[in-house]
Amino acid sequence: MKLISLLIFSVLVSATSAFAHSPYFGQREKVELPEFGEVEFAILFGDGIIFADPSQVIVFDSEGRLLAATPLSDGFIIRCNRSNDGQFCSAYDAVRGLVYQPELGLWERGRTIVEDGRPSGDAYPEYIDISYGFIERPATFAEKVSFEVAGIAHAPGSTLFAIFWWCLALAPMARLFWRWRANDWKIKPVRFFGVLKVFLSVTAFLGMAFLAVFSLLYVPYSVLFFLFVFTLGGTVAFVITRPWGKRTANQSP
């Protein structure tokens, strides 16, 4: 028993070491500010080991010195506005629905956080415990939509994959729907293969839905984003499975 316990412990330690990684940057945006020159807003990710990597938005100058940092979260989006009046960026916590607006009067140069364009080796946001220079407030609905659009534009590949996933998950259910409609919403005599089709369709949907929910542990996202990809994926599924020809009656589900 001790040997088995030791082997299990060794496997867990090895797996943890394999998944461990250095801090890294996600989205990055550069702006020019009169008080600080060229600064960069960046999402700094730490190491969540087997779960979502904790992150925070940091601001640093051209020398890599930290100027400001938000609290930790699992899902940040940066949106920058550039106009004749100036440039500024703000951060959005998509998980908690909070906006972080920079307050330049609270900025100050701190430790070196970036070296050779990369985060310092010890700059894990979950350990450095630094948060200042931003004002936190709840996001309005319009701001939530605006930030989500900015996030989709920044990562279109992830969005398309999520839409495809839900399209694939809902396609069997959509096919059942169209067959039921073709039967004038009536339940026809039960047949073995009809029951099997229903069972497999529901199982496939529930399985893919479970995997999507499970993925929240690794890549958290907002309710708005979920509603967008789920609705669009479902719409595509219902469109591509619809029998566009003449309705056929007396079909078993």
Image: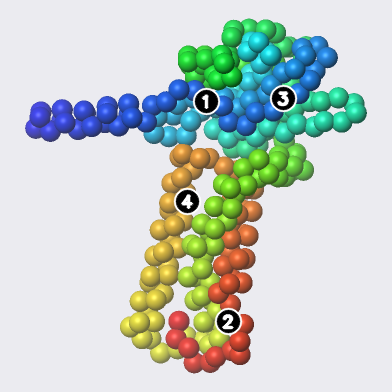
Residue at 62%, 32% (x, y): give it. Answer: 27
Residue at label 2? Answer: 243
- Among numbered discs 2 and 3, the one appearing first in the sequence: 3
- Among numbered discs 4 and 3, the one appearing first in the sequence: 3
Position in image of residue 92 (x %, y %)? 67, 33
**Mark 4 Cα shell of 10 Å, populated few (<14), some (14-19), many (≥20):** some
Check disc 2 and give the amino acid type: Pro
- Among numbered discs 3 and 1, the one appearing first in the sequence: 1
Pick the front one: 31 or 239? 31
Spatial CA span between label 2 and label 3: 50 Å
Element under disc 1: strand
Check disc 3 and give the amino acid type: Lys
Position in image of residue 120 (x %, y %)? 52, 15
Which image quarter is the C terminus in?
bottom left
Residue at 68%, 32% (x, y): give it. Answer: 78
Check disc 4 and give the amino acid type: Ala
Element under disc 4: helix
Residue at 82%, 31% (x, y): give it. Answer: 82
Pick the front one: 241 or 203? 241
The label shown at residue 212 is 4
Residue at label 1? Answer: 24
- Among numbered discs 2 and 4, the one appearing first in the sequence: 4
Spatial CA span between label 3 and label 1: 17 Å
Q: Nearer the viewer, mark 4 or mark 3?
A: 3
Element under disc 3: strand
Q: Residue furthest right?
A: 84
